[in-house]
Image (cartoon, rainbow, N blue to C red):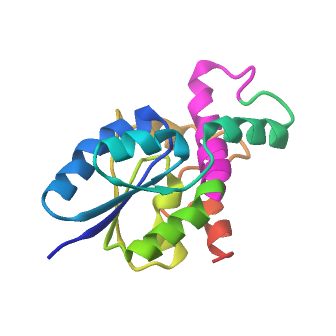
Amino acid sequence: MTMRVLVVCIPQAGHLTPLLPLASALAEQGDEVVVASGPDVADTVTTAGLRFAAAASGPAQWFPALSKRIQGVPGDGLPAARILPYLVPRLFGEIAATDMIDDVLDAARALDAHLVVYDPVAFAGQLRTFGLNVREVRRETAISIWPPILQQPEPGALTMRPTPLPAARNLADRH
């Protein structure tokens, strides 16, 4: 049976590159694979022989949006140990997920995906949160950042919880 697989990632090389071997192996065995991400990685995806679905604007727009929201420089003045616990929920859990979700849902529905493989901070890939009956795999792309974030939530920040994230629940209400 051919699987239809949607790969969802943040549109940066460090998020896409670790997913390409798996996506390519799935495509080589005959599965239908679509990568949903921002336009900054479209050429890399298509050069790898995979289909691309535009989903998100990308970090060049996300950081200014976060700066505007917090009225300052994201993470400015925080000690190094607090940067990830501060940025991940705000930048990826709020700004990026909101930017990506409509396009990711459209891509999943158009593909009629059986499986979603997502980058650990591409929270829009958690499609069961949005009522789609699809299996999900969070594909770690580096050393896991979750334990420090789980143990050190920034006061007042969204904490990294099992699906659904609070931001994802708010987005899910729209769909």
Left or right side of 63 for 161: left
Query: Residue at (42%, 32%) from the top-left corner?
Result: 14
Left or right side of 83 for 105: left
Could you tell me residue 22's position as x and y percent? 23, 48
Left or right side of 44 for 56: right
Tell whether position 87 is magenta.
yes
Query: Residue at (45%, 45%) from the top-left corner?
Result: 42
Could you tell me residue 50's position as x and y percent? 31, 52
Left or right side of 79 for 41: left
Query: Is there any visible trace of residue 158 in the rendered image?
Result: no
Image vertical order of residue 11 relative to residue 34, above or below: above
Asked which quadrant contains residue 137, the reply is bottom left
Asked which quadrant contains residue 72, the reply is top right
* Viewer-nearest residue: 3 or 51: 51
Quarter that holds the C terminus: bottom right
Could you tell me residue 168's position as x and y percent? 60, 63
Could you tell me residue 99's position as x and y percent? 65, 55
Magenta highlight range? 75-98
Query: Residue at (66%, 35%) from the top-left corner?
Result: 60
Query: Is there any visible trace of residue 170 in the rendered image?
Result: yes
Image vertical order of residue 21 relative to residue 125, above or below: above
Quarter that holds the N terminus: bottom left
Query: Residue at (58%, 41%) from the top-left corner?
Result: 88
The overriding secondary structure of the stretch rendered in magenta is helix
Tell whether position 27 is magenta.
no
